[in-house]
Image (cartoon, rainbow, N blue to C red):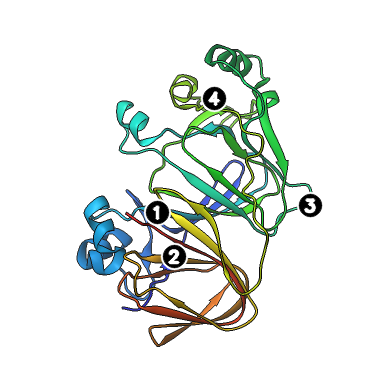
């Protein structure tokens, strides 16, 4: 098996939509096209051949990453995710570290990421109560190519007009801090998780939360390197061969722009924007052709 494509799970939300491209989340698993097997079933059967030997020892039969495209028509709630350690204390299987790569978004698109000023846990609770929590958050106008890393514990929210790719741990643990006093279709306010969030927030303040890099053509550019995933971006106008012979991990390729073809250990497939491909750990090399921009992500245990 040289590559896998999956049927996305499209979820309509109060604020817009999510397309879960590759998911091993319990009861929300993607199924391989032309195959019928779920992602975790494939992991169970193929083991290290699919995910890498070290990754299989680390994660077992659950695929370690969740890949989404997010289309925000309204602001998402202000939220935070716990670390693995805090999640375990709260009775959850794991926390959630993630990243965003902004795609073709609206000119006015903005998002929140991180604290812009120091606040205490007591001030946090008061600012949630009096509807001023956004005053403490760093807000960014965004455009295609912007990248943000969101380690567990960092307050964040995607804003209206954003269209982006999200890479995250396989986890659906989200603590909603503030929801702009919106009501659902039944006229009810959505549940807030003020206490759980307060236990999860990292109150460290940074000068800038945007990932800084200089876009380059026809080479790999590392964006994020963390214990949960490594992610690079490729912006190609010419053919390239990517050598995976020494990598003990699956690779996920996420199409951002353009179209082309991939030769995966000699087997050809089309590849275009909005498409996600899972390349098993057993694959030795991938050759690209065409004008295409994509993210490459994998896990090093």
Q: Name the residue under label 1.
A: 65
90 left or right, relative to 56: right
Mark 4 crowdedness (10 Å alpha carbons): few <14, some 14-19, many ≥20: some
Question: Under tag 2, what secondary structure?
Answer: strand
Say which residue appears at 58% left-offset and 71% top-offset: 219
Q: Residue 203 carries which label?
A: 4
Q: Exactly how many numbered labels are in the figure?
A: 4
Which mark's residue is nearer the viewer, 4 or 3?
Answer: 4
Numbered tag placed on residue 252 in the rendering? 2
Task: Give the foreground label among 2 and 3.
Answer: 2
Gap between marks 3 and 1 measured at Cα: 30 Å
Q: Which of marks 3 and 1 is nearer the N terminus?
A: 1
Classify mark 1: residues with Cα within 10 Å, few (<14), some (14-19) or many (20+): many
CB contact under 8 Å: marks 2 and 1: yes
Q: In this view, does 152 lie above or below 229?
A: above
Q: Distance between the residues labelled 2 and 3?
A: 29 Å
Q: Which of 117 and 65 is in front in this view?
A: 117
Residue 123 against residue 67 in the figure, above or below: above
């Amino acid at each position: 098996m040289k590559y896998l494509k999956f049927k996305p799970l499209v979820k309509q939300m109060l604020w817009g939509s999510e397309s879960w491209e590759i998911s091993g989340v319990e009861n929300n698993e993607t199924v391989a096209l032309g195959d019928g097997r779920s992602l975790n079933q494939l992991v169970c059967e193929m083991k290290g051949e699919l995910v890498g030997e070290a990754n299989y020892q680390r994660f077992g039969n659950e695929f370690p990453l969740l890949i989404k495209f997010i289309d925000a028509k309204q602001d998402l709630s202000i939220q935070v995710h716990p670390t693995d350690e805090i999640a375990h204390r709260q009775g959850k299987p794991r926390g959630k570290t993630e990243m965003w790569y902004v795609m073709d978004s609206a000119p006015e698109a903005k998002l929140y990421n991180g604290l812009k000023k120091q606040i205490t846990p007591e001030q946090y609770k008061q600012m949630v109560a009096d509807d001023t929590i956004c005053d403490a958050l760093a807000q960014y106008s965004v455009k295609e190519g912007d990248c943000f890393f969101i380690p567990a514990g960092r307050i964040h929210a995607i804003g209206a007009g954003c269209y982006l790719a999200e890479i995250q741990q396989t986890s659906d643990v989200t603590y909603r801090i503030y929801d702009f006093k919106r009501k659902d279709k039944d006229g009810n306010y959505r549940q807030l998780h003020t206490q759980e969030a307060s236990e999860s927030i990292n109150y460290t303040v940074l000068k800038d939360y945007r990932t800084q890099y200089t876009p380059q053509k026809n080479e790999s550019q590392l964006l994020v390197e963390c214990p949960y995933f490594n992610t690079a971006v490729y912006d190609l106008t010419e053919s390239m061969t990517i050598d995976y012979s020494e990598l003990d991990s699956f690779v996920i390729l996420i199409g951002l722009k353009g179209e082309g073809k991939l030769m995966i250990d000699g087997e050809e497939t089309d590849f275009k924007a909005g498409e996600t491909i899972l390349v098993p750990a057993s694959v030795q090399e991938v050759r690209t052709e065409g004008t295409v921009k994509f993210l490459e992500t994998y896990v090093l245990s």
